């Protein structure tokens, strides 16, 4: 499995290199000695079949229209059994980093696709990145030259905006467009709060519980009665409709389901009870009105409460602004989110500090977590401005 992950990473990188033609394109020579000219690299295929469709390539002066397949090694054509798949007969050029099967790659009809090895045409930084194995830490550490602090800060600003947008999208995924906006929006935020309180071990279980409670026909008049109702739905085997497989081990007492369910129920109750107009106020005001209505013993610890505010409440207010076409509400929710201090765990900072980057305090620092998770750990170097700045310096 590790080898397949390495291959997928390098193949994504090679796809980007081909799509952006990030290599020397003059005097390209195929492995069989044909001259290759790229007229149009084609369109990246997100479905089954070759990697790029509708490509235009000249081979020895003859213009060809068809598909392009990308591999790290030529032998991957055989390993993936493309020689048995007719939809790969449209491949007019087989692009590889290295050709380890010269003359042994065939289409299903017995003909050979022209193979182009691009290793000789890559810049030194790209060649180095293409050879890297999956290692701990940042791939750019000690491997790419000319990485400037300004480029790093620009990328973190981009990651910060993406992180907020990602959190808005998480709430949107829970939004049911049928029915009243006010009710559907409240339910979406409620579900996301349940998930957030589930930490990592019980997120899906908490969402299952939230949806089950939302479907209830009757609602108690008091917070305590509502908490009892949710507890019964979660833990009473005689009254709950669907069994919820809670994970109880390996977590601190404050994070166990019996604690989190009661807290989620309190949030749920007060979101339902508060007039919709409250959430149209300035986000700082509506948050204060909302949390002050919850009994103190049912409010989670400061860090968890702050996390709910930043990853659920404020993105939910932004989504509400989108639904109501209120740029004021959207702008203010994002501004409030940026203005507040963000505590970044040392484990998030460590890889960047080890790579030699200076981390400044401030709103942009929250983008570090998104950068590490969505770019660095996923090896999405080719989508990172930092990487692009380095290879093009």
Image (cartoon, helix red, strand yellow):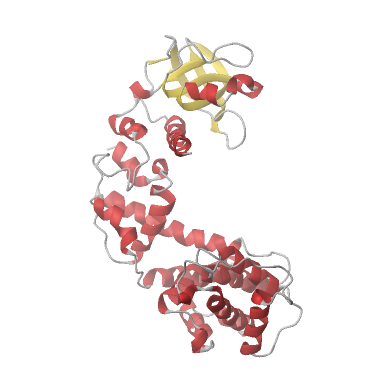
- Pick the residue in front: 350 or 331: 350
Using residue 244 as the reference point, say whether residue 129 is left or right of it: left
* Residue drawn at x 74%, y 77% as measured from the top left: 239
**Residue 92 visible from this viewpoint:** yes
Furthest-right residue in this view: 217
x and y percentages locating residue 321 in the rendered image: 56, 69
In the displayed structure, 77 sits above or below 206; it is above
Using residue 60 as the reference point, say whether residue 345 is left or right of it: left
In the displayed structure, 378 sits above or below 329; it is above
Using residue 299 as the reference point, say whether residue 230 is left or right of it: right
x and y percentages locating residue 57 in the rendered image: 51, 19
Quarter of the image holding residue 173?
bottom right
In the displayed structure, 135 sits above or below 304; it is above
* Residue drawn at x 49%, y 71% as measured from the top left: 314
**Residue 324 visible from this viewpoint:** no
x and y percentages locating residue 3 in the rendered image: 44, 35
- Pick the residue in front: 46 or 213: 213
């Amino acid at each position: 499995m590790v080898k397949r992950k390495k291959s997928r990473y390098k193949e994504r990188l090679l796809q980007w290199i081909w799509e952006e033609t990030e290599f020397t394109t003059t005097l390209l020579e195929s492995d069989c000695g044909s001259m290759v000219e790229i007229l149009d690299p084609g369109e990246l295929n997100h479905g089954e079949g070759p990697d790029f469709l509708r490509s235009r390539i000249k081979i020895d002066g003859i213009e060809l229209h068809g598909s392009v397949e990308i591999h790290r090694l030529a032998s991957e054509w055989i390993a993936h059994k493309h020689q048995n798949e007719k939809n790969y007969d449209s491949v007019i050029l087989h692009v590889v980093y290295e050709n380890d099967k010269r003359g042994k790659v065939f289409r299903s009809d017995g003909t050979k696709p022209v193979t182009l090895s691009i290793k000789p045409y890559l810049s030194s930084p790209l060649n180095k990145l293409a050879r890297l194995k999956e290692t701990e830490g940042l791939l750019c550490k000690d491997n790419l030259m000319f990485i400037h602090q300004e480029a790093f800060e620009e990328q973190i600003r981009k990651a910060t905006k993406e992180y907020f947008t990602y959190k808005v999208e998480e709430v949107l995924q829970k939004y049911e467009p049928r029915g009243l906006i006010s009710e559907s929006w409240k339910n979406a935020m409620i579900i996301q709060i349940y998930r957030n309180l589930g930490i990592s071990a019980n997120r899906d279980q908490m969402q299952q519980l939230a949806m089950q409670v939302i479907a209830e026909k009757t609602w108690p008049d008091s917070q305590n009665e509502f908490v009892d109702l949710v507890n019964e739905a979660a833990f009473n085997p005689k009254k709950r409709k669907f069994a919820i497989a809670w994970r109880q081990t390996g977590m601190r007492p404050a994070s166990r389901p019996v604690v989190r369910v009661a807290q989620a129920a309190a949030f749920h109750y007060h979101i339902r009870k508060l007039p919709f107009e409250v959430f149209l106020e300035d986000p700082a005001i509506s948050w204060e009105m909302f949390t002050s209505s919850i009994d103190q013993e049912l409010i989670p610890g400061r860090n968890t409460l702050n996390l709910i505010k930043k990853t659920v409440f404020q993105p939910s207010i932004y989504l509400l602004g989108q639904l109501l076409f209120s740029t004021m509400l959207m702008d203010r929710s994002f501004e409030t989110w940026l203005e507040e201090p963000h505590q970044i765990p040392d484990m998030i900072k460590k890889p960047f500090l080890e790579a030699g980057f200076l981390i400044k305090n401030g709103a942009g620092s929250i983008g570090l977590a998104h950068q590490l998770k969505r770019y660095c750990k996923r090896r999405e170097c080719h989508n990172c401005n930092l990487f692009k700045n380095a290879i093009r310096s």
